[in-house]
Amino acid sequence: MAGDRAGRLWRRLWRRPPAVVGAVVVLFFLGLAVGAPWIATSDPQRSDYGKIRKAPTAANPFGTDDLGRDNFSRVVWGTRISMQAGVFSILLAIAIGVPAGLVAGYRSGGLVDQLIMRLTDAWLAFPFLILAIGLVTIMGASLTNATVAIGLAATPTYIRLTRGLVLSTREEDYVQAARALGAGGPRTILRHILPNIVSALLVQATVSIPGAIIAEAILSFLGLGVQPPTPSWGTMLNTAQQFLETAPWMAWWPGLAIFSLTLSFNLAGDGLRDLLDPRDY
Amino acid sequence: MLDFLVRRVAISVVTLLVISLIVFTGVRMIPGDPARVMGGTDADAAGLAEIRQKYGLDAPIPVQYLRWLGLALRGDLGESIRTRESVVWTVARKLPITMELAGLSLLIALTIAIPAGVFSAVRRNTVWDFLVNAASLCGLSVPSFWLGLMLILLLSVRLHWLPASGFVPPWEDVLGNLRRMLMPAFVLGAGLAAVLMRQTRNSMIEILSADYIRTAWSKGLAGRAVIFRHAFRNGLIPVVTILGLQTGALMGGAVVTEQIFVVPGFGRLIVESVFTRDYPLVQGVVLITASTYVLVNLLVDLSYSLLNPRIRIGGGTGGG
């Protein structure tokens, strides 16, 4: 039975090559992030003033930057920062948004629901980036604060999504049955509703992680995120902008890294959505 | 209909109030003396006393909030620490530039997205559909600021076709203005185009499989008439809604785009004010952006209810 299911899953996956490619590339970047010390052996923060803004060579395949640092090392180590910011900010958004959405959905129409939803509406009115900029202004610029700001900016999406999912799940027969059998509120939410909305939340996460990765890069690009000399794709592009004419390779690789990582997340997310959509059976 | 309008406006008013509360609380969370925060580090004792008196900083917090809200409603958002000019005036001067940028990028996005989306829905599951989908996915994934840098590299540094940055007011030199706005507008519009393309395609696909379209086909109407007269008009309604929701992304995107192309608009203003710790200006910009978003979406919803007879006649059933 289990083998049959795995086989079916595998066949359905195989019908979507873009999703498979996306997932493989995401795993590749994950490997880069974890294996950075072994893959990029030269110190990403060590300057070599004899090699300032040198075009790509065998020793420095991505060239060097304005302080003579190896761009390849910096791009590889930058993967860590991006992955960290992308994943942790969305985890934060889920940790706040899902419980709030569960409560609002379960008690829909009540005072708590009204309170949560009006706050969510207002929170959603702040454009993602403007909100993140505002929060970083209050908290100060650093990777941690940028991650928190991005997470908080992404939270209302999860509140709304969870609430909507709860509203539609609550009316299902099996939930009604559980209630009729005497299950209380918390038990109904945790045992019967939550497991059935997890897949939709998972899909949303794969869509919002690339958004968060871009947001971190933008904040760092603006100087509001990761501070130099820590290698991050956003700060690298910020420096690269000043040397576009003389050292264009400084701008190629970090940008290409962000693009391919976010594209892969989106491809994998699309595939996951198709895969988890029960209507497809 | 009236019910729906009143409800919708009431919700917007509540949302605006909550926004003002969030912004007020946010500014109060900045460590240090609030008078110092609003007056800047070089404010003298007399200046600080004046601010204390203006905002009633000795009164309880709720009273302070009401006082601040009253001033904001009368258009007084304080003055910039750096220039000592009123925040509202500073924003008002920068806003037209960003609005031109946003307007142009909207135009570019719509010109690309609507035809591509309709085409891809009509030719569903063909190579064309695949190409449109791929383009839209790339548009969603490409970081706008990198796209901007690459365009500068190609069109300005290599080909010398367009100036890399700067701004010329349109009343001084229309062509020069457009030449400088083209790249930023395209960069800002690319992400929006991707979103709109997807939305147009999806809603057209849905509409094209509706019963009344099948009826139109079976009446023997020509393909073009069915697609444009019957499907297109209804297919566009959700696109308008998405457009409203995207104003926020457009305003956020303007921050980055203006930074790359050195466009002296609203977005550059906010980044500058963050770096100079010009808190009144940051507060004003954030408050104005969020309120604009709420008002734009209110307008979109209202116009939507005028466009869609089901909401108009149904007395607000579609308003949820």
Image: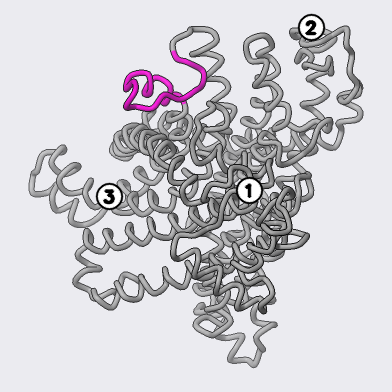
Under tag 2, what secondary structure? loop
In magenta segment, residue B71: no
Vertical comparison of A179 with B194: above or below: below
Q: Position of residue B243 (x, y in %)?
A: 38, 48
Residue holding disc 3: B235
Task: Name the one closer to the observer, B191 or A149.
Answer: A149
Count residues near mark 1 (Cα–Cα under 10 Å), then give few for <14, some for 14-19, many for 20+.
many
Which residue occupies 65% across, 81% down? Answer: A188
Q: On the picture, is A266 further left or further right than B43? A: left
Task: Name the one closer to the observer, B101 or A58.
Answer: B101
Residue holding disc 1: B81
Q: On the picture, is A89 further left or further right than A39? A: left
Q: State whether discs 2 and 1 lie on one chain.
A: no
Vertical comparison of A100 with B91: above or below: below
For the record, the magenta segment spans: B162-183
Locate the N terminus of chain A and report the quarter of the image it occupies.
Answer: bottom right
Q: Which of marks 2 and 3 is in front?
A: 2
Residue B81 in view (yes/no): yes
Sooner in the amino-acid sequence: mark 1 or mark 3? 1
Task: Name the one closer to the observer, A106 or B109.
Answer: B109
Q: Position of residue A132 (x, y in %)?
A: 64, 50
Pointers 2 and 3 in contact (C-beta within 8 Å): no
Residue holding disc 2: A57
Rounded to the nearest angstrom, the CA distance separating label 1 from label 3 is 49 Å
Under tag 3, what secondary structure? helix
Q: Which of marks 2 and 1 is in front?
A: 1
Task: Name the one closer to the observer, B265 or B34.
Answer: B34
Of all chains, the one bearing label 3 is: B
Q: Where is residue B68 in the image (x, y as percent from the top left)?
A: 56, 68
